Image (tube, rainbow, N blue to C red):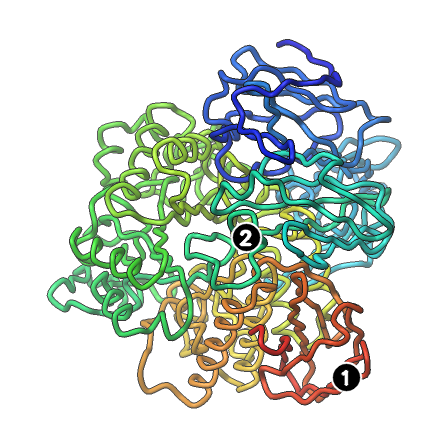
Amino acid sequence: MRKILYLIVVIVFASCQNSNDGFTVPAKSEILGLATPVSLNINETLIYLDDYFLDVTKIDSVSADNLFLELSEDKKQLVIKTIEANTPKLSVLNVWIDNYPYSILLKASQKIEHTIIYNPKGEKYKNVNVAGEINAWDPANTPMNFTDGLWQAKIFLEPGKYQYQFVVDGNWILDPDNPVKEDNNQGGFNSVMQVGETKTDSLPFLYTYKSINKQIIIGCENNSDGCVVFWQNSQLSKKFVHKEDNLATINIPEAATKLEKSYIRIWSYNKFGFSNDILIPLYKGKVINDVSEIKRTDKYAMIIYNIMVDRFFNGKKDNDKPVEDPEILPKANYYGGDISGITKKINDGYFSDLGINTIWLSPIVLNPDSAYGKYPDPYTKFSGYHGYWPISFTKIDHRFGTDNEFHELVTTSHDKNFNVLLDFVANHVHENHPVYKAHTDWATNLYLPDGTLNIERWDDQRLTTWFDTFLPTLDLSKPEVYEMLTDSALFWIKEYNLDGFRHDATKHIPEVFWRTLTKKLKLQFPSDKLIFQIGETYGSRELIGSYVNSGELDGQFDFNLYDASVAVFAKDDIPFTKLKNSLLESFKYFGTHNLMGNITGNQDRARFISYASGALKFDEDAKKAGWKRDIKVENKVGYKKLVLLTAFNMTIPGIPVIYFGDEIGDPGGNDPDNRRMMRFDNLTPDEENVKEITTKLVKLRKNNIPLIYGDTKFLLTTDNTLVYIRTYFEQAVIVIFNKSNTEQKVEFTIPYMFVNKEFISNFGTNFKINNEHFELILKDNSFEILTIKNYN
């Protein structure tokens, strides 16, 4: 390793494109896309530079202010060591190639030391550990030591609230000395610890104010100690940024006119922490102010519709071949949905009418023809109708269709301006997969050293655990395995011109696989081709976010935010403060402009409407309930609560994801009851109403640029009401919720720059305006969205 201390140097730019404003950029960028910021650890941080750069051998040097840097000899890795007393809140790592500095934002760690204590009160125990959101719910990650009559552990954590339990000699218990607890949405509770103070209201808040010709004006609320401005992956000097009072004027560099699409990014900070981030898209150097300038290849504008192929629409009866085994109950067998059925619905205009622009398909690779697995009551085995038991990496299952039919689906989708994402299963194969039969040593061990089965050990054995005895987990840390499987993923993009992947079981796969796949995608496909990758990980936000970066995935599903949404919208006694705080936590880890998936539901959870209508209880086994009784919508309030959830997803940052059937309020328990055949006809008036509202919400999302690139500011939060505004320069969208069972009067104040704008109601609620003061009466379990006239 060689150590480089930051030096202030004067560089003479060479082999760069000169411009009249003195801002020079290389003719071709060495970074594809926008370099994700790095959150530093307290003492030492490892950065994989080949996450960012296509060819690290071109790197000449690295530099950063008040940080020690150690660059490996092969230039693939960089270790950053902090100088604690002098580490700035925000700093910039410059990576020099051909005398040009590529800039990567560095965010100082906000973690503080926290001591966790369990008082045994004189009882003798062999082992006490803690598990929770602090350590991915794995007690092995935080062992506790017995000192001075107490079990103790010291851990560094970001300020905030964390759910946890103690594990005392193998028994999971709440903290007996902590009265604060929260519902875990699974029929139980977790203790809650508060670490430090979160002073959200004292942080700087940035907002887009005006764009005039080649200038952008940014406003800032609360004191700011400094800001950092990037165009693409280049920090703009003071020459381009002029600050006066609470406004900053940014001159767009002339180099931006040479690119069809580029971005301005802005961050700020003060002693309390970081501001929200600003993301402004440019078209040939001009601020994009209208959705007509946004193409389907814009990742931030995606609205995803999640389809389970077998359960959507049967377009071709002659490929219907359920597994013939009397031990499979019908719910766990093939229903007949197929590729041609989806194409038919595309041509019928179902997706165009709904307004979505991205289709995500469940796996379509070949699955076995036999039954596997067991469910005890009622007894049943299962078929591979869901597609997650692959016996091929590249062959399409004959029950779903043919290569030509899949080509037709993708081509038709693109012709109608839709993206197509495919679910890719990398973690495991079925035991009948030819690769496993030929290379059993390519799988992890089914048995742990103590002789126990390594089945469903999601946390303590997450990189090796098997999903079932007939589903070997591949050891993707082996080069021969991850090289083969990443090439298989590339096959689908090359052969069918797909737009990306949904990746199954992300946290159970070593990161070398994700880095290898993403690097291959960057090297083999042009930079203007959309390749979007979103992952599935259940765990803490820190764990989920560890896979979201320039070298791995674009985003993951935000299950923590979904859990908070389910609790708040489905339960009358959970306040909106829980949802607001959860969203702010997501902003802290993923940014206020992110590509995280915000779901209405998914194939592994009981339908939201079943909880919201009282058909399911949170403390019951939702899988068993789905087998034992016909779950319906018990109370029509469930439909109202479902559209509240949909409205929330459609109006917050991130990517909205509709699970098929949620656009009509289809009920159901857990798997397989949440995978009923999609219904298109003979809908009830309530279902038609849900579909109509969902369609309107999707189109509001598509047609209002503040909902895609806007800033987010909360205007009012009470137990039963929530108001926030999304703003983008002179455009704004105001979102108002009432989750109570009674009519509510809602009053709030809007930012001063929108005082003279004319707002309209999109869902029929009358409102009054007196300067910046708004007043309206919302019906029970309802919402309203206000937009500026002529902008929606």
User: Which secondary structure, mark 2?
Assistant: loop
- Quadrant location of the N terminus? top right
Residue 132 visible within the image: no
Residue at x-position 31% and y-position 52%: 363
The answer to whether residue 676 is left or right of residue 302 is left
Q: Residue furthest left?
A: 318
The residue carrying mark 2 is 596
Question: Which residue carries the number 1 mark?
Answer: 769
Name the kind of residue labelled 1 in the image: Ile
Which residue, as the protein is rendered here, is positioned at the far front? 20
Question: Is 427 positioned to the left or the right of 567 in the image?
Answer: left
Q: Is residue 627 visible?
A: yes
The 10 Å Cα crowd at callout 2, few under 14, some 14 to 19, many 20 or more, is many
Numbered badge on residue 761: none
Percent position of residue 37, x then y: 63, 37
Residue in the foreground of this view, choosing between 381 and 234: 234
For image coordinates 31% across by 73% down, the residue present is 349
Between marks 1 and 2, how big is the CA–CA gap?
A: 35 Å
- Give the mark toward the camera: 1 or 2: 1
Q: Position of residue 55 (x, y in %)?
A: 46, 22
Q: How many numbered discs?
A: 2
Q: What residue is shown at x 34% (from left), y 33% (from top)?
A: 524
Circle 1: element type: strand
Instruction: Identify the mark nearer the N-term, 1 or 2.
Output: 2
- Measuring from the top left, give residue 624's x and y in whole percent: 44, 67
Residue 124 picture location, percent across and down:
78, 38
